[in-house]
Image (cartoon, helix red, strand yellow):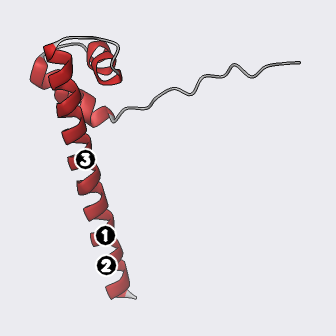
Amino acid sequence: MNKVTKKNPTKYNQYAIDGLVLKYGLSSYYIRQSVSGNVDGITPDLIKSDYKKLEADINKVVQDTITKFLNIQNKQS
């Protein structure tokens, strides 16, 4: 009869959060709340759209780096 009550915390890209903290001068808590949709207003909407752009750019850079690394490894083999 034990019910599992473990929450699944959402993980945000910390590099994107840090960049938005620098851009907007707001706390990381407020940035995370804005991205999750818990805060209403114009600024949170801007933060959310900027976060999506930053996250996509960061993921692209990571993917490109991995691809480059794998290509270098394949050439050495």
Give residue 56's mark.
3
Residue identified by numbered label 1:
67
Closer to the chain start, of discs 1 and 3, is: 3
In which quadrant of the rendered view does residue 46 lie? top left
Q: Could you tell me which residue is drawn at 40 percent across and 88 percent down?
A: 77
Q: Residue furthest right?
A: 1
Q: Could you tell me which residue is drawn at 18 percent across and 26 percent down?
A: 20
What's the distance in space between the residues labelled 2 and 3, CA to CA?
Answer: 22 Å
- Circle 3 sits in a helix, a strand or a loop, which is it? helix
Query: Residue 51, how many percent across, how many down?
Result: 23, 33
Please state which amino acid type lies under the numbered disc 1. Answer: Thr
Q: Could you tell me which residue is drawn at 69 percent across and 19 percent down?
A: 5
Please state which amino acid type lies under the numbered disc 2. Answer: Asn
Q: Residues within 10 Å of mark 2 (few under 14, many from 20)?
A: few
- Check contact, mark 2 vs mark 1: CB within 8 A: yes
Vertical side of 18 occupied by 63: above or below: below
Query: Residue 50, how many percent across, how many down?
Result: 17, 32
Q: Closer to us: mark 2 or mark 3?
A: 3
Residue identified by numbered label 2:
71
Name the one closer to the observer, 5 or 71.
5
Q: Could you tell me which residue is drawn at 32 percent across and 32 percent down?
A: 14
Closer to the chain start, of discs 2 and 3, is: 3
What's the distance in space between the residues labelled 1 and 3, CA to CA?
Answer: 16 Å
Please state which amino acid type lies under the numbered disc 3. Answer: Ala
